[in-house]
Amino acid sequence: MSDFFDDLLKKIFPNREGNPPLSVKENFLLKEKDLHDLEEWNKSEESKALFALVYRNYHYKRAQINDTPEVHVFSSAYANGFALSYSPEVGANSFSLLFLGLSRRIIALGYEQVSLDRKLEEVNEQVKETEKFYFKPPLQLPQEGELISQLYGNISLEKIRINQQPSYFKLLASVYSDRLYYDAKPFDELMDRLFERP
């Protein structure tokens, strides 16, 4: 298997020796098959159980309790979020579908998908692949004297794989600190809405 990765690295990053690590970034579109697979998975008990498990473990982590799959919490004045470490019990397919499912739920909240890109980079002689969605609240022209709604702020959703193996994904909501905008809605409310049963 290591020959495969060596060959891949040579194809993606030729003449690596003596050169700084390289990276390749591309925009891409979701395939109809991915969206169809997600639609079918969303109807399953496995989907409901996994959303419930991650939501529970998020609240456990906030109470300083760790459970599998492990959730990590980010909290600051300008950005809040969580990361989910991959666990073999979840399975690579369900992990990817959960990631994709969250992206569709963000759009259902009224967000606009601004970009979807993939980045391959060499890190410590390993191939790190990052898929990233970026979402913004819908553009609005406010009435004179009114503030603009930022919903929960800008949202990024990233999935990381190392040598083609799932590692983790993270969601981060970054708020605007601009007097033209209303304060962002609470991150806990975003989590409630993302993880509620459809």
Image (cartoon, grey):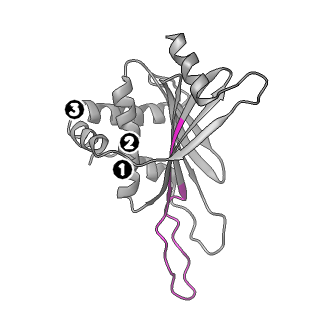
Query: Which quarter of the picture shows residue 144?
Result: bottom right
Query: Which quarter of the picture shows residue 129?
Result: top right
In three-dimensional space, the C-alpha distance between marks 3 and 2, rounded to whole angstroms, equals 17 Å
Give residue 45's mark.
Answer: 3
Residue 77 picture location, percent across and down: 66, 52
In three-dimensional space, the C-alpha distance between marks 1 and 3, rounded to whole angstroms, equals 18 Å
Residue 169 picture location, percent across and down: 50, 35
Magenta span of residues: 130-154
The residue at the point 54 percent across, 11 percent down is 2
The residue at the point 44 percent across, 31 percent down is 57
| Residue 169 vertical placement versus 180 (above, below) | above
Which amino acid type is marked by label 3? Glu
Give residue 100's mark.
Answer: 2
Which amino acid type is marked by label 2? Leu
Residue 68 picture location, percent across and down: 44, 22
Report if residue 141 lies within the magenta region.
yes
| Proximity of marks 1 and 3: CB atoms separated by less than 8 Å | no
In three-dimensional space, the C-alpha distance between marks 2 and 1, rounded to whole angstroms, equals 7 Å
Q: Give the mark count.
A: 3
Looking at the rendered structure, the secondary structure element under dot 3 is helix
Looking at the rendered structure, the secondary structure element under dot 2 is helix
Q: Earlier in the sequence, mark 3 or mark 2?
A: 3
